[in-house]
Image (tube, helix red, strand yellow):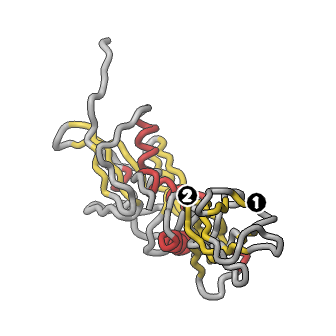
Amino acid sequence: MSSQSVSEYTLYKDVRDSPPLINDQFRGTRESILTSLVERGDMLWALDWDRDADQQVVQMANIGDRTSDRELDLVNYNWNTRTLGRQKESATVKGAAITVSEESVTADLINDNSLANDNLVEGTAQVRDAATGDAYERGIDWRLNEASGTLSYPAATAISDGQALLVDYEWKPIGSYAVPNASPKKALDDVTVSATTDAMCEALAFYLVDRLEDPVESGTLTIPELPPGWSVLEALAVDGLPNDGAWTPRGLSVQDGRVELEVASRRRVQDVVADLRGRLEQHGERI
């Protein structure tokens, strides 16, 4: 028997809330590549036979977003409300470290100095004389509150009041969001992503809380027998689920025509955070 190979697949991608595919290249088995693609969003994939085109096609879709003009009863489902992932009512997001070189400061020995940024990276600051470039010693000539970006001066400092200084340091953008009366026990702290402004970190903190505030509903859907000619995605255009929301797949098995699908009302904390980081990296964005 001669060997066979596949030169290309037609991929039908009918999904929401997922990064686009633009000139992407992949290596690996078909199954591993397609699985990695659907993990970018709340999707499933299926390899089906297109009767009209007389060829195999790969389809991607979100659960509940496909429709069908044929009826297939959802014979059985088990449902419960339990904690698959913790609820989050507040979030703090930090961006990547940004280097600031030679920020000009006029020493104020009485009122201290506020640098242009706060949330400085510990151990990165240097203070130099603007005219000579001579470095001053931390703890003896100057002190720094990294959280507030406040530069102060001990009594024995060699720096004179009104002296022109240059300050080098690194800082990280930071932003937070919380629902009213948020519980400290339901806080998501110190999520680090590749954002470069406080405003973007705040927007991303809202993004996380918006997706993690609600409790998790989970369940298993069972279709005992998938009729010949039916796509798994078409079969999952089902009625009878407990609510009208979008469902996140957690596991799918098809054995001898029997379909079992584990779904949840939302993704776990670690999945949402990993997805956010992946989306930023996928688009090559430093926002």
Q: Which residue carries the number 1 mark?
A: 137
Instruction: Compare residues 146 and 52 and report the one nearer the observer.
Output: 146
Residue 8 in the image: state x and y as whole percent: 27, 33
**For the residue marked with disc 2, what is the amino acid?**
Thr
Q: In this view, does 17 lie to the left or right of 208?
A: left
Q: Is residue 277 above or below residue 265?
A: above
Q: Which residue carries the number 2 mark?
A: 99
**For the residue marked with disc 1, what is the amino acid?**
Glu
Residue 67 in the image: state x and y as whole percent: 30, 63
Residue 231 in the image: state x and y as whole percent: 33, 49
Q: Could you say which quadrant of the image residue 166 lies in?
A: bottom right
Q: Which residue is drawn at 58% across and 67% down?
A: 93
Helix, strand or loop under label 1: loop
Query: Looking at this rendering, what residue extends furthest in the left direction?
Result: 52
* Of the two numbered discs 1 and 2 in the rendering, the one whose residue sits closer to the viewer: 1
Instruction: Compare residues 2 and 235 and report the one nearer the observer.
Output: 2
Residue 208 in the image: state x and y as whole percent: 54, 69
Q: Which residue is drawn at 32% across and 61% down?
A: 66
